[in-house]
Amino acid sequence: MELDHLTLLTVQGETIERTGRGIGPLLHLYLDCPDRLKGARLFDKVIGKAAAAICVLSGVEEVNAHLMSVSAQTLLTRYGIKVECEILADKILNRSQTDLCPMEKACLNEDEPENIVLAIERQAKAMGII
């Protein structure tokens, strides 16, 4: 499975592919058609804590990533979601590698998936993602 875009394998046998930057494709799937995420297998390039919280709340069964943060792995495994990644990183950085990813920064002090998703929705609105 190529990880240059988000791929979702649904329990109904459907393959959904989305392209876009950052958390946008996953966030839009979560907001527009959350039922498709329930029980699905998700493949994405980068999974941070923000994306992990979306996966928890939507009932994703398995998450596969090229790069995953330790906080994402911890959150996913805490909720019984199967996790696979090629690179496990302490944190997810922004595109210029100068600071934390804006979504990671938005949910830095949150631990509960519901609060994390509220924080990233606020950040996504501020950034014009949604």
Image: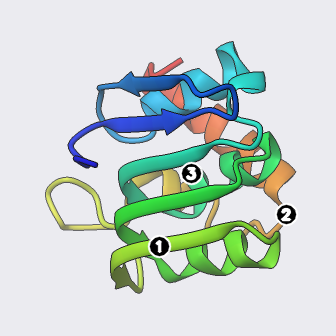
Percent x, y of residue 114: 85, 49
- Direction front: furthest residue: 13
- Above or below, 94 against 11 in this view is below
Say which amino acid is labelled 2: Glu
Q: In the rendered structure, which disc, 2 or 1, sits on the residue that comes first in sequence?
A: 1
Q: Position of residue 115 (x, y in %)?
A: 82, 52
Identify the residue under disc 2.
112
Give the residue at x 35% y 41%: 22
- Of badges 2 and 3, nearer the viewer stands 3
Q: What label sits on residue 84 in the rendered view?
A: 1
Q: Amino acid at mark 1?
A: Glu
Q: Around disc 1, counting alpha carbons within 10 Å, would you say few (fewer than 14), some (14 to 19), or many (20 or more)?
A: some
Residue drawn at 55 percent across, 23 percent down: 14
Q: Nearer the viewer, mark 3 or mark 1?
A: 1
Q: Residue 117, image x and y in percent? A: 73, 44
Residue at 66% in and 81% down: 74
Q: Secondary structure at mark 2?
A: loop
